[in-house]
Image (tube, grey):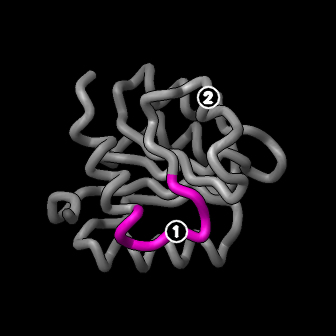
């Protein structure tokens, strides 16, 4: 099931090729790439700026865990999905209700996770 058409997505990803692939997948799903961030500082700024409906948040940004960004998203009641190349480990254990998509991900995986994030109670 695809996310609602026009869903605005913030992509937080430090690997350019993965970010570009995610952008393509997001557009294939009928969503809009609202903005991208490649490091913690950019991600925090983008979250504070807003203008998105859901975020794709890489757990590891240039060797730093993105838990600060995750906490800010929760504080602002902004739904998000963790993405990771390290399986299901990492800070996801501290955020049990947040969907996790393992890399390399497929558009179908993103669609499921985005829907889960934006329809979760809270």
* Vertical comparison of 16 with 97: above or below: below
State the SS at label 1.
loop
User: Is any atom of residue 41 visible in this view?
Assistant: no
User: Residue at label 2?
Assistant: 93
Query: Count the marks: how many?
Result: 2
Q: Separation of disc 2 and disc 1 at Cα?
A: 20 Å
The reply to whether the magenta stretch includes residue 59 is: no
Q: Nearer the viewer, residue 61 or 91?
A: 91
**Residue at the spot 64% in from the left edge and 28% down from the top edge:** 68
Residue 52: x and y in percent read: 33, 48
Is residue 55 rendered to the left or right of residue 45? left
x and y, in percent, of residue 92 in the image:
59, 34
Percent across and percent down for residue 4 are 16, 58
Residue at disc 2, secondary structure:
helix
Which mark, residue 1? Answer: none
Q: What's the residue at 26%, 50% (across, down)? A: 115
Q: Residue furthest right?
A: 63
Find the magenta span and give its range.
101-109
Does the magenta-highlighted stretch encompass residue 104?
yes
Question: Residue 78 placed where, x, y %?
Answer: 36, 34
Question: Sequence-wise, which precedes: disc 2 or disc 1?
Answer: 2
Q: Is residue 121 visible?
A: yes
Q: Which residue is mark 1?
A: 105
Compared with residue 106, is residue 57 higher up or lower down, i.e. above or below?
above
Q: Nearer the viewer, residue 29 or 109?
A: 109
């Amino acid at each position: 099931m695809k996310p609602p058409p026009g869903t605005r997505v913030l992509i937080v990803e430090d690997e350019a090729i993965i970010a570009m692939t995610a952008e393509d997948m997001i557009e294939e799903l009928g969503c809009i790439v609202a903005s991208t961030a490649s490091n913690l500082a950019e991600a925090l700024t983008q979250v504070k700026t807003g203008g998105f409906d859901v975020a794709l948040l890489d757990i590891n940004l240039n060797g730093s865990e993105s838990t600060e960004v995750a906490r800010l998203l929760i504080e602002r009641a902004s739904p998000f999905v963790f993405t990771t190349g390290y399986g299901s480990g990492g800070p996801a254990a501290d955020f049990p209700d947040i969907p996790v998509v393992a890399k390399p991900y497929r558009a179908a995986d993103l669609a499921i996770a985005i829907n889960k994030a934006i329809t979760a109670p809270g």
